[in-house]
Image: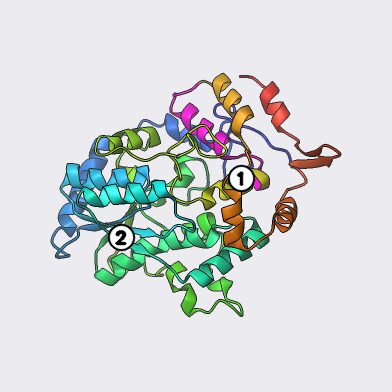
């Protein structure tokens, strides 16, 4: 297997499910070329709201909410632009941060109601450790929880509409099951693409079917229960920079306390969970690209930085080890550093990594830096 990089944004072929054209351009860049008229979609959204208004005595919809810039911008837009009252639902982070707590509190102070689903912590820590060892992903179960919790809450309170942020497979490169999946949440797509497994398969001597309730999806989503789950990005142009600018109009969004998050040059993404630092480091180990290359590709796609500057950023930050936060992650996972490094090395694909007397070397990054900038 050989890694190739997008001719426009550097996204590598190791990104799961990404598709390249014959000319070597990833499908995220191809998607950004499409000229979409959002006005009819805005009208469609307004009509959807008319159809659900009054069906619940308090809330018009649920917003899948982390307290971050994207989901917070959606909540504010729904209220300010459409006069919609959303219930904000989040799944508790593994290792909460002060920045995340601050941002959630500020949104609540703007007049929003929220619910945080906190699962059985003994099971959560067990699954985090198990999936880090087995799959190099300490947040796999959390990803299932943040996807399922808003739907579960909406179902319980009989709120007919749920909003998620963006459709990642089309926005960032991946496998799009159908045109409708760009607009409406598809349970099968979530299980296959975002989680890679059905939580019911996680049962063992420690994990019972009952303890997995918060990670499972209702199988009748969008069918006979009349509950719809939609992507906000279908109805409005998606841009993370514009999202944080929008939120900052209402309060000063708390960014990374260290000036930037580990492994990248930005300071505003995934600041609510300390475990994200390890998660993105493992992305670099497993797929050969980290947080910085991801951010560079998105900024290039929106025309905000040049390819030459993007290469400089990748060279400086991609794959950075989270030294200041790793001990907290290892305590959560109940792992020693020795065992941790052993597990990390087990998840290094041989087609990406080569070991020498000087340590591990990425086989393809030198080609990227020598390429056309």
Quadrant holding the N terminus: top right
Quarter of the rendering containing residue 236: top left
Q: Quadrant of residue 22?
A: top right
For residue 273: magenta? Answer: no
Asked if the residues shown at circle 2 and circle 1 are in contact, with their CB atoms under 8 angstroms apart, the answer is no
Considering the whole magenta stretch, tell me its main secondary structure.
Answer: helix
Q: Residue, x 36% and y 43% (percent of image)?
A: 70
155 left or right of 48? Answer: right
Any part of residue 325 in sight: yes
Please say whether residue 293 is one of the residues in the magenta stretch.
Answer: yes
Magenta segment: 286-305
Of helix, strand and loop, which one carries label 1? helix
Residue topped by disc 2:
228
Give the mark nearest the N terminus, 2 or 1. 2
In the image, residue 314 lies at what x, y percent?
60, 30
Residue 281 bears which disc, if any? Answer: 1
Q: Give 183 or 67, whichever is nearer the viewer.
A: 67
User: Circle 1: is it few (<14), some (14-19), or many (20+) Cα within 10 Å?
Assistant: many
- Front-most of 243 and 253? 253
Colouring: rainbow
Identity of the residue drawn at 34% across and 47% down: 103
Spot occupied by residue 53 in the image (x, y as percentages of width and height): 15, 58
Mark 2–mark 1 distance (CA, rounded to whole Å):
35 Å
């Amino acid at each position: 297997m050989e890694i190739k990089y997008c001719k426009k944004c550097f996204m590598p072929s190791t990104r799961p499910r990404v598709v390249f054209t014959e000319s070597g351009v990833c499908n995220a860049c191809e998607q950004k070329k499409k000229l979409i008229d959002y006005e009819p979609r805005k009208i469609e959204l307004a009509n959807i709201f008319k159809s659900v208004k009054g069906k619940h005595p308090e809330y018009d919809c649920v917003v899948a909410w982390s307290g971050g810039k994207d989901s917070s911008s959606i909540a504010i837009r729904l209220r300010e632009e459409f006069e919609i009252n959303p219930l904000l639902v989040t799944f508790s982070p593994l290792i909460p941060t002060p920045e995340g707590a601050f941002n959630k509190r500020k949104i609540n102070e703007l007049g929003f109601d929220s619910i945080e689903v906190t699962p059985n912590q003994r099971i959560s820590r067990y699954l985090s450790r198990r999936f880090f060892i087995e799959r190099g992903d300490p947040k796999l179960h959390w990803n299932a929880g943040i996807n399922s919790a808003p739907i579960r809450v909406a179902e319980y309170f009989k709120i007919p509409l749920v909003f998620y942020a963006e459709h990642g497979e089309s926005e960032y490169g991946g496998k799009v099951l159908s045109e409708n999946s760009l607009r409406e949440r598809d349970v099968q797509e979530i299980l296959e693409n975002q989680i890679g497994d059905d939580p019911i398969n996680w049962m063992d001597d420690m994990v019972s079917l009952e303890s997995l309730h918060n990670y499972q999806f209702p199988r009748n989503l969008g069918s006979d229960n009349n509950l719809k789950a939609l992507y906000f990005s279908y109805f409005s142009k998606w841009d993370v920079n514009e999202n944080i600018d929008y939120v900052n109009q209402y309060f000063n969004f708390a960014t990374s306390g260290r000036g930037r998050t580990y492994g990248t040059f930005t300071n505003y993404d995934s600041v609510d969970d300390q475990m994200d630092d390890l998660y993105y480091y493992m992305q670099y180990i497993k797929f050969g690209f980290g947080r910085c290359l991801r951010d560079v590709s998105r900024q290039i796609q929106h025309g905000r930085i040049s390819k030459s500057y993007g290469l400089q950023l990748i060279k400086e930050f991609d794959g950075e080890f989270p030294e200041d936060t790793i001990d907290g992650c290892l305590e959560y996972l109940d792992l020693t550093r020795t065992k941790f490094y052993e597990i990390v090395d087990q998840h290094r694909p041989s087609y990406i990594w080569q070991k020498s007397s000087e340590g591990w070397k990425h086989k393809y990054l030198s080609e990227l830096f020598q390429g056309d900038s």
